[in-house]
Amino acid sequence: YLLSGDVKLVRAAVRERDQLLSQAPGLIDPLGFLFSHYKGRFPGPHLFGGLLWAYDLFSGSSNHHYYPAPEYLLLAPNIDQRRLKGGTSYLDAVVDDARLVLRTIREACEEEAFALNYVRVQELLFEKNRVIGVCVKDEIAGNETDLFARVVVNATGVWADQLHSSKYNGPHIRPLRGSHLVFPFWKLPVSQAVTLRHPADKRPVFVFPWEGATIVGTTDLDHGEPLNSEPRISFPEIEYLLDIVRYQFPSVELERSDILSTFAGVRPVIGGSKKRPSSEKRDHSIWEQDGMISVSGGKLTTFRLIAQDVLRVAAPLIPSVEERGTPDPPFNKRKGDELPPISLNHFLRRRLEGRYGSHVMHIMQTEMNEDLERIPGTNTLWAEVRWGAREEGIMHLDDLLLRRTRIGILLEKGGTGYLDRIRDICRQELGWDLKRWEAEAASYKKLWEECYSLP
Ligand SMILES: Cc1cc2nc3c(=O)[nH]c(=O)nc-3n(C[C@H](O)[C@H](O)[C@H](O)COP(=O)(O)OP(=O)(O)OC[C@H]3O[C@@H](n4cnc5c(N)ncnc54)[C@H](O)[C@@H]3O)c2cc1C
């Protein structure tokens, strides 16, 4: 981002990242990154170190270090050693995006927010050419209802354009797909994230350890598919990502058959005039038309600043919203209760506390001792699957396996080897009968085959 001149975005993101790291360890964690420098390849250690110096300046601490080749190879033993000069290590952060969003929504609801799941805004309601509410449809029950509000904020990401009226003349979204490959960790072991520049287009691609697996991503290309279908990786994207891994980790000899799963997302980027998707700016935009505020673009890291900007625009329309200098801390502090004395190692306790905040007590106090075991090959406890089913608005099995927990992308064949145990949890917690379970399992397997495996 710095190389493309997004200084404001970088400064805001670095400061927010540091706040999040201190507020929710176990959810947002530091992650070391490595960047290799080769003779004749850009950027060299001096320029790269200079860019990182700017990050460090925003962060107020020195987080990068250059290692000559022999020492660097101790950190990244599998990388291509031909013409290697050395490498730079630096510190950034990693998060489970779904858990960040879930914790934010849950804590907001504990403070009088009201959230609805599987409820779609069908159309806007107007009075004298101003938006005064929305008509929503419950996608499960099928009924529709009108909701009225002093301010409607359209924060529907990549779908934002679908809610605009025909007279709309504001910015438009350029949907850009980013896809990933997931490998078993032992196939592509990396101790920290490795930042690579793809030889084909010089874009950065990351290889990083995540939740017991190794992820390679991402791509960045125009998403021409219908937005209401689940995005999926394409064949050329698989080749693009495999190419860079083979190029940078020649000794690992990865094959397509080594891929555990794939997943893709679509970025809501405000469309500019740039030809290359990766040249589009990534910062957020907020605009108002007919009394509706739309917000799009931006980074997950800066979600709190984006929300604050939206409130600033909304403030004249809602007298009770008052401007405060600095936003509140992003998360509630867990009440001082001692955690139950169960045998969970420090890493797992911290992970649960970060992800579930105050609710960690309920997860740990499970009546089923066997639920406190990890699902093999992941850091996820069975207790999290049960908690998700019991408390986190599960309507379909893919909610539970792909967006509350991530076992659908971390386990072989989407975790179908564990479906018997998951069935028991769903039947106990969600009251699904056998017929419902079989329908859910069948549609999950179909979705997984179509969008989370190899095309
Ligand atoms: C591949 C990829 C990599 C990324 N990497 C990073 C990164 O490294 N760092 C970073 O900070 N950010 C990253 N991001 C960006 C970050 O994830 C986005 O900023 C974020 O997803 C956009 O958030 P959003 O809330 O605007 O949209 P979304 O997360 O898409 O949320 C929009 C919501 O609106 C709902 N919705 C849509 N239409 C309707 C309707 N009609 N009625 C009701 N609800 C509706 C959708 O169901 C969805 O839940 C990445 C994104 C992608 C796709």
Image (cartoon, rainbow, N blue to C red):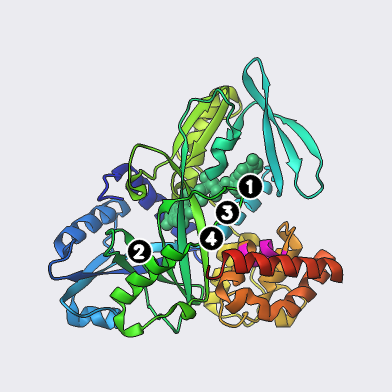
* Residue identified by numbered label 4: 232
Q: Residue furthest top?
A: 128
Left or right: residue 285 compared with residue 165: left
Please tell me the numbered disc located at residue 205.
2
Tell which circle, 1 or 3, labels the residue nearer the N-terminal end.
Answer: 3
Residue 88's quadrant in the figure? bottom left
Tell which circle, 1 or 2, labels the residue nearer the N-terminal end.
Answer: 1
Q: CA distance from mark 1 to mark 2?
A: 34 Å
SS state under label 3: helix
Seen in the picture, residue 138 relative to 78 is either above or below; the reply is above
Residue 399 in the magenta stretch? The answer is: yes
Tell which circle, 1 or 4, labels the residue nearer the N-terminal end.
Answer: 1
Magenta-colored span: 397-402
Across and down, in percent, residue 395 comes to 75, 58
* Residue identified by numbered label 3: 101
Amino acid type at circle 1 is: Ala
- The mark lying in front, picked from 1 and 3, is 3
Tell which circle, 2 or 3, labels the residue nearer the N-terminal end.
Answer: 3
- The mark lying in front, picked from 1 and 4, is 4
The crowding category of the residue bearing disc 1, from other C-alpha atoms within 10 Å (few below 14, some 14 to 19, many at least 20), is: some
The dominant secondary structure in magenta is helix
The answer to whether residue 114 is seen in the rendering is no
SS state under label 2: strand
Left or right: residue 156 compared with residue 445: left
Q: CA distance from mark 4 to mark 2?
A: 18 Å
Residue 146 in the magenta stretch? The answer is: no
The crowding category of the residue bearing disc 4, from other C-alpha atoms within 10 Å (few below 14, some 14 to 19, many at least 20), is: many
Amino acid type at circle 3 is: Val
Left or right: residue 176 compared with residue 448: left
